[in-house]
Image: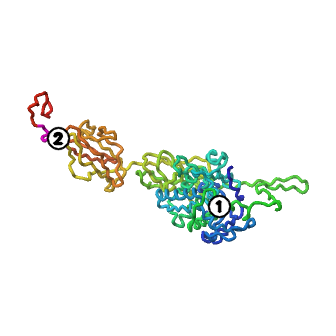
Amino acid sequence: MTAHFGRRLRKGAATTAVAAAAVAALSASQAPAVTGAHRTLATDQATPDGSTDHSATGDSPYYTDLPPLSSPNPSPSDSQSPSIGTPVSVGEAEAGIPATILDAYKKAETELASSKPGCNLPWQLLAAIGKVESGQARGGQVDANGTTTSKILGPALDGNGFALIKDTDNGQYDGNSTYDQAVGPMQFIPSTWAWAGRDGNGDGVKDPNNIYDAALAAGHYLCRNNWNLSTDAGLRSAILSYNNSTDYLNTVLSWLEYYRKGTHSVPDGTGTVPSGRSDDNSPSSPTTSPSSPTPTTPATPSTPTTPTTPSTGTPTPTPTPTPTPTPTDTVTKLADAGTAKLTAVAGEQFGKKISTKAQTSAGKAVAKVRIRFTIIGTTDATFVGGEKVASVNTNASGVAVAPALQAGETTGDFTVRATVVGRTIAGLDYTASVTPRVADTLVRTSTTALTCTAGGEFADQVEVKATENGAVADKVAATATLIKAADDATENDKGPYFKDADGKTVRTLTGLATDADGLLKLPKLYADDTTGTFLLRITTTGGATLTVELTVTAADTSSASPSPSPSAGAGTSSSATPSA
């Protein structure tokens, strides 16, 4: 059976008071009382087109239960059976996190500590969000691999009391080919999972229904934009990006504070599940007893009443008001706003940023419109923070400035496409180029002469250091070739050589690169039976070249020559001198 979260109150419903801070919210709680809170936008204005591109969950409903006021000792009243809606202290039980769920959170924290150490993600934040989004996967209803035993789905985001997000995955994750729905224990909408999804358990699949995948994806989502979660500003920004509600923020902060004071592992499937949700109509349980009066069904707000004319009784239609266009509705084109040439050396940050302007058909700038920037093409470049998608609101001049681009190691061109969120108009493409790392100087790290006897091997390996404008040139591609002469770079067919993995003779090495210190150490060199002076040429991208001299001398055979023997006349020779 697929579990669905309930439908949130329609737009225009009053919101409850928001706690001023996490500690205040925690102090005011009476677990597991339901707050009945509805969404309070944390921004000064909702995104005009109703899109929640900035939200991992599409601002779907969430659990509003706050943690116990006192923990972890169970209350003596735990054994009592309270009436519906009476707060009950569950004490230590609320601090229990199902074992597999807890393991996934901690593994995600470890991975983020390595991949994005500046984020300072605590696993307790993932636990707090997991509690609020799905009640820790409905109390740990997962299999041995961490996949939920049945799908956890939010309501269809059809614009009817919710954001309007039309289907983006053809129903692949949520089974809905008309509208998107939040999916899995961390409640990602498919359009966000498409770029934020991660493979947390190493099975080669990115599954929003798997807690290892979802927890790692949530960690990376919270750590984008260079947010530092050890700061108040970074923490608040990250949480609000997950669900843009002040009530949501304070609920998550309350659980984060609670979990930081201590948690313990409980068997999968035995965790506590919250009861109150942000789409509840009242703070009491929605269950109606048989003796309760039948609730009155209010008139549908969207259905206009039709008055009648007293004299004739003929209905007079109420005119349908013309909706006021949103800023997004007025955008007809995107224009470049002075973006300079986008180039960067591999591994470095681009010095220029993309600037895009939203305009009306008359060329007037449009403010407060959300522009989505997407990196397209075969590249490992990202926006600073590690993501390939970024969304920015246009300013008063109608301009949205994308985050800085970070080049990876893949060189060549790629595209960044700017589109308007919630509006189908032509996008605007920008070409960005990543050039190879370069070096302008190569020097040997040793002055020892490189010599060897014919048929032997060189005692010293060739090591060089690369620099660019005097600075260390790391990860610079290089080639080493044993050439015929200083003015003939053709590969030599005799003299010193390298060996490949199979022990075969090789006189050209490609795919080399300097290390983090700009150093490159070549494999051991061997000599055939040809004596003389030979040349090894090393070149790098950027034009740095170094020619190294190698000397091969004749083997000393004097001590190895046998003494003449009286019996040597039987067709053998004691001389090692080759014939002319």
For this rendering, which residue is in front, 464 or 1? 1
Please tell me how crowded label 1 is: few (under 14), some (14-19), or many (20+) other residues with Cα within 10 Å. some
Q: Earlier in the sequence, mark 1 or mark 2?
A: 1
558 is within the stretch colored magenta? yes
x then y, percent, for residue 218: 56, 56
> Image check: 304 left or right of 16?
right
Q: Quadrant of residue 253?
A: bottom right
Q: Secondary structure at mark 2?
A: loop
* Depth check, front residue: 270 or 486: 270
In the orientation shown, which residue stands out farthest toward the right?
A: 311
The amino acid beneath tag 2 is: Ala
Report the number of numbered marks. 2
Task: Tell me where residue 102 sits by quadrant.
Answer: bottom right
What residue is shown with label 2? 555
**415, 27: nearer the viewer:** 27
The kind of residue on which mark 1 rests is Thr
Query: Marks 1 and 2, Cα distance to the nearest angstrom?
Result: 82 Å
Q: Residue at x 62, y 45 (%)?
A: 172
> In the rendered view, how is the structure colored?
rainbow
In this rendering, does residue 362 appear at all? no
Q: Is residue 412 left or right of residue 259?
A: left
Where is mark 1, residue-wise? 272
Q: Please name which of the two marks, 1 or 2, marks the residue nearer to the observer.
A: 1
Q: Is residue 23 above or below residue 224?
A: below
Magenta stretch in the rendered image: 551-562
Q: Foreground: 382 or 19?
A: 19
Q: Residues within 10 Å of mark 2 (few under 14, many from 20)?
A: few
- Residue 72 can be seen in this image: yes
Secondary element type, mark 1: loop
Considering every residue shown, the one lying at the far front of the view is 567
Vertical position of residue 333 compared to residue 132: above or below = above
